[in-house]
Image (cartoon, rainbow, N blue to C red):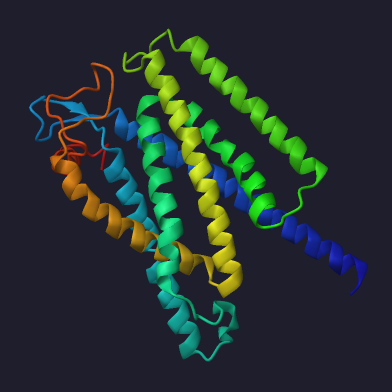
Amino acid sequence: MPLALRENQYVLALAFHLGIAFIMVSTGTINTLAAKWADLSRARGTNPVEEHYFIHPYLQAASMFLGEAMCFVPFKIWFYCSKFRDEDMKKFGPQKFNPLLWAIPAMCDLMGTSLMFVGLTWTYASSFQMLRGSVIIFTGLLSVAFLGSKLLLRHWIGMLFVIAGLVVVGVGDFILSDHESASGAYTPNLILSGDLLIIIAQTITAIQMIVEEKIIKKYQVPPLQAVGWEGIFGFSLLAVLLVPMYYIPWHLPASEDFWQETTRFEDSIDAFHQIGHSWQIA
């Protein structure tokens, strides 16, 4: 292959990966801001309080899984269109695997996402977005331990920079936690608890990524199909769990402004009423 052609392919591949990274960061930031905006939005619901905050992290997690499950639709369209056109089906892999395998990473995703949404209600959106970067550290360490990956010096240096950044975020939240936000919704204990929950969630997310990589490599599963199966299992399980959550007489700890008069672990009925009364939440 000519040198010029190889260089051109390298530049295109680099541009593609940088583009994907930019899209991931951008959409992740938009997702965080949108979720936090919903948390801080007030609307009428079934709660006795006239207007109250949209504090429904588990329903938010269920919405995320529903979005993942919908990835199965474009995958099936892509699969059957390729089959109809007699295209090479090797890109879809052998398609010989037990779908229940995806229940394992789906459980990790469920726990990690739920903890992150709870943590987001207790801390700042900026801290949430930066603390999510700790997944790089946990994933790197677990990949060495369970996947036999070899990290280069630049990888370890990058992880050290991430750790330094996390320390700065944690110390910043600790120093500034005495000064409540304009809404008065934050307390020092609440902020630090939220930060800790987000970091714990990243350890679970790292385990999820390791399991996903092992399954995808072993069974050659297309990523879009993998996301779809995870969404189906996660949404189905969480949709069932939302029923007993409604009857559990306990509410997430929060400051007085967050506290509501009813004590339900997750009041989904109240959430749907709030969505119906507020276009910002919807």
Which residue is found at the position 31% from the left and 17% from the top? 185
Q: Could you tell me which quadrant the C terminus lies in?
A: top left
Residue 46 vertical position relative to residue 8 in the rendered view, above or below: above
Residue placed furthest toward the right: 3
- Give me the residue at 55% from left, 31% from top: 130
Q: Position of residue 115 (x, y in %)?
A: 39, 38
Q: Residue at x 77, y 36 (%)?
A: 157
- Give the quarter of the figure containing the N terminus: bottom right
The structure residue drawn at horizontal position 47% and vertical position 66%, both measured from the top left corner, is 226
Q: Nearer the viewer, residue 36 or 111?
A: 111
Q: Residue furthest top?
A: 178
In the shown orientation, is residue 268 left or right of residue 215? left
Q: Position of residue 155 (x, y in %)?
A: 75, 43
Q: Is residue 74 above or below residue 158?
A: below
Against 58, residue 93 (above or below) is: below
Q: Is residue 130 left or right of residue 75?
A: right
Whole-percent x and y of residue 193?
A: 41, 24
Looking at the picture, does residue 243 appear above or below residue 124? below
- The image quarter containing residue 43 is top left
